[in-house]
């Protein structure tokens, strides 16, 4: 048996590539462990025309199937697989994909039906100057690599990977590629710390917190939480954060603000481009950055994630265009 994660898989056009945003959980109802030996995918358009076929098996030293890591589906248990073929060059919009997984003793076959991205266009980047996307939603980004069948996810009460399409913004030195100066032992050494954050879109503030102190570094350069970190509630990992209701049930969450810098309160109406606060190092973060995610509700545990698309992005040194951004991108507002 199989279960597709998330329940609404998006075929997200990102420039010349289409990102197929889904993973899957495989269940073994048998009495013995089995091992995955092959994963294949065929992508089709709405007319049934095949657009691309991809697979990973055992041919190689080692074969690409080894990239899945532990391939065991335990007896009476399940295995979470992150889609190994997320970004494809397609000649037409993807409508659905047929998946086949071979394991010792059998096959699992299922179809993934894709949905178009209906997220609102964000008029602004959240940083009104050059910034760096430390983490996005690509195959290796930590935002998407959350197995919902894992014990930590279950203990935390996660129903969806709400941060799947999240973006982490900070700043780097364009000459060296470094994120900090000196040895990075002080908050102020980090180029992103204290950078102003603006509203990417109009909205109404439905949650705002700005009282949590920023984390600091010890002599070894390791992040140290504030002493009473555990007292800040279940959402303490977000640090100081706000949630904007941007209409049609869609909400924008922005987190890890510097203590005391948020300029808005619950009930305030926010205009795109308005100053919101400064990048900080509050909550569960090891370095100063702004975390931003779009979701279909106000709750960060139960809402469903939505991809983010910007009206115009200056990809530093390359081009200006509308669209999505991802891990490693150097970006700035369009002139």
Image (cartoon, helix red, strand yellow):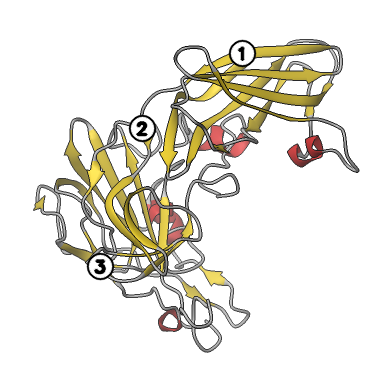
Residue tagged by mark 1?
Answer: 110
| Residue 254 vertical position relative to residue 171 in the rendered view, above or below | above
> SS at mark 1?
strand
* 2 or 1: tag closer to the N-terminus: 1
Q: Residue at x 47, y 43 (%)?
A: 16
Q: Residues within 10 Å of mark 1 (few under 14, many from 20)?
A: some
* 3 or 2: tag closer to the N-terminus: 3
| 248 or 334, nearer to the observer | 334
Q: Disc 1 versus disc 3: distance between alpha carbons?
A: 44 Å
| Residue 266 vertical position relative to residue 317 in the rendered view, above or below | above
| Residue 334 vertical position relative to residue 73 in the rendered view, above or below | below
Question: In x, y percent, where is residue 176?
Answer: 53, 82
Q: Residue furthest right?
A: 61
Question: Left or right: 2 with respect to 223?
Answer: right
Residue 195, by quadrant, is bottom left
* 1 or 3: tag closer to the N-terminus: 1
Question: In x, y percent, where is residue 305?
Answer: 39, 35
Quick check: marks 1 and 3 in contact, CB under 8 Å?
no
User: Which quarter of the image is occupied by the C terminus?
Assistant: bottom left
| Residue 160 vertical position relative to residue 163 in the rendered view, above or below | above
Question: Left or right: 123 with respect to 192?
Answer: left
> SS at mark 2?
loop
Query: Can residue 313 be seen?
Result: yes
Residue tagged by mark 3?
Answer: 128
Residue tagged by mark 2?
Answer: 303
């Amino acid at each position: 048996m199989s279960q597709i994660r998330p329940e609404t898989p998006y075929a997200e056009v990102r420039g010349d590539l289409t990102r197929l945003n889904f993973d899957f959980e495989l269940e073994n109802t048998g009495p013995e462990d089995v091992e995955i030996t092959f994963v294949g995918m065929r992508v089709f358009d709405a007319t049934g025309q095949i657009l691309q076929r991809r697979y990973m098996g055992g041919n190689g030293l080692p074969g690409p199937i080894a990239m899945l890591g532990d391939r065991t589906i335990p007896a009476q248990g399940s295995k979470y697989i992150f889609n190994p073929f997320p970004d494809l060059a397609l000649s037409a919009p993807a409508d659905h994909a047929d998946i086949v997984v071979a394991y010792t003793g059998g096959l699992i076959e299922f179809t993934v039906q894709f949905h178009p991205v209906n997220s609102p266009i964000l008029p602004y980047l959240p940083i009104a100057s050059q910034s760096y996307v430390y983490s996005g939603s690509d195959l290796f980004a930590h935002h998407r690599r959350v197995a919902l069948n894992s014990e930590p996810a279950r203990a935390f009460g996660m129903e969806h990977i709400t941060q799947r399409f999240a973006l982490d913004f900070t700043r780097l030195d364009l000459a060296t590629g470094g994120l900090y100066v000196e040895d990075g032992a002080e908050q102020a050494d980090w180029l992103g710390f204290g950078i102003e954050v603006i509203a990417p879109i109009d909205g109404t503030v439905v949650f705002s917190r700005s009282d949590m102190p920023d984390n600091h570094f010890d002599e070894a350069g390791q992040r140290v939480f504030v002493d009473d970190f555990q007292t800040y509630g279940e959402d303490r990992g977000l640090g100081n954060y706000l949630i904007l209701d941007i209409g049609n049930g869609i909400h924008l969450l922005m987190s890890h603000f510097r203590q005391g810098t948020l300029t808005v309160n619950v009930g305030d109406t926010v205009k795109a481009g308005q100053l919101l606060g400064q990048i900080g190092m509050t909550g569960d973060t090891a370095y100063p950055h702004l975390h931003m995610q779009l979701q279909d509700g106000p709750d960060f545990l139960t809402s469903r994630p939505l991809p983010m698309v910007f009206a115009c992005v200056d990809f530093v040194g390359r081009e200006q265009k509308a669209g999505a951004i991802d891990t490693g991108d150097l970006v700035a507002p369009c002139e």
